[in-house]
Amino acid sequence: MIEVDGLTKRYGRTVAVDDLTFRVEPGRVTGFLGPNGAGKSTTMRMVLGLDRPSAGRVLVDGRPYAELTDPLRRVGALLEARAVHGGRRADHHLLWLAQTNRIPKSRVGEVLELVGLAGVARKRVRTFSLGMHQRLGIAAALLGDPGVLLFDEPVNGLDPEGIVWLRTLLKGFAAQGRTVLVSSHLMSEMALTAEHLVVIGRGRLLADTTVADFIAGNSRSYVRITTPDPARLSAVFAAEGIQVTDIEGGALAAHGVDPARAGELVAAHGLVVHEMALRQASLEEAFVRMTASAVEFREGE
């Protein structure tokens, strides 16, 4: 597992990561979320020993990354897909990495096949599209068949088919008992991929919980109702102490009531209803609500 304990990183007077503590458990995909400037990339760099903490520590399987023997066999990471020498062939890039960690040469062909780059293995990396760079970075992360995986924005440049492929891959690794930490701004994808969330803002921990509990705790569900007589329905519900508001598409949102009670009121008053369904906020809506005060960069600033 990954253990982050009191982790702090300062750059002069700027505190990028502020006394951060959490654990990334094996057997599930953990989404690492936060607004721009929240400290996600800095935290991941400290996990990998690329940045030195100002205070606190981060351990992988109980040891600092720098103390791991053959680290590519223990931890696979994708932080910056384009951080590859453009003049190298894809297979040579992976072969060089394999030789530094005593990984068999045969593994290069295996991971290229796995990520769908076997047909361009001998191509120079400078000719690759962004999506191909992402796949090569994923191949490098998987090269040592590690038990811990870290990915920073791994779906960048991938087409819809590639996004589904990566989602299936990450969930499959978690099902094998591996530790998977994924940072992404694509909330819809995180909702489908992650089981657990670690959310930070301005370098501080905001949430460490399941996706379902995060959404439930940071949003309000409501009953969506469409009716040809919205004024009468609103009056009936208001008389019962139920708040009703207008929403998009000419529908109404009834707050603080479940569908069963709403249906009883509709039937009792002979109201005509064309649609009635419970609506739950999305992960994106819950995320925006929780992190609103922690957003460092806003449009127009």
Image (cartoon, rainbow, N blue to C red):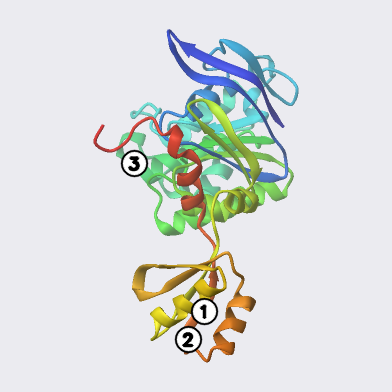
What's the mark number on residue 243?
none
Earlier-in-chain disc, 3 versus 1: 3
Residue 16 at x, y = what percent? 47, 20
Q: Secondary structure at mark 2?
A: loop
Residue 208 at x, y = what percent? 64, 38
Q: Are marks 1 and 2 in contact (CB under 8 Å)?
A: yes
Residue 46 at x, y = what percent? 56, 20
Earlier-in-chain disc, 2 versus 3: 3
Task: Point out the image quarter for the N terminus.
Answer: top right
Q: Nearer the viewer, mark 2 or mark 3?
A: 2
Q: Is residue 209 above or below residue 71?
A: below
Which residue is under mark 3?
Answer: 128
Alpha carbon separation for disc pair 2 and 3 = 54 Å
Q: Residue at x 48, y 54 (%)?
A: 188
How many neighbours does mark 2 have within 10 angstroms: few (below 14), some (14-19), or many (20 or more)?
some
Which residue is under mark 2?
Answer: 273
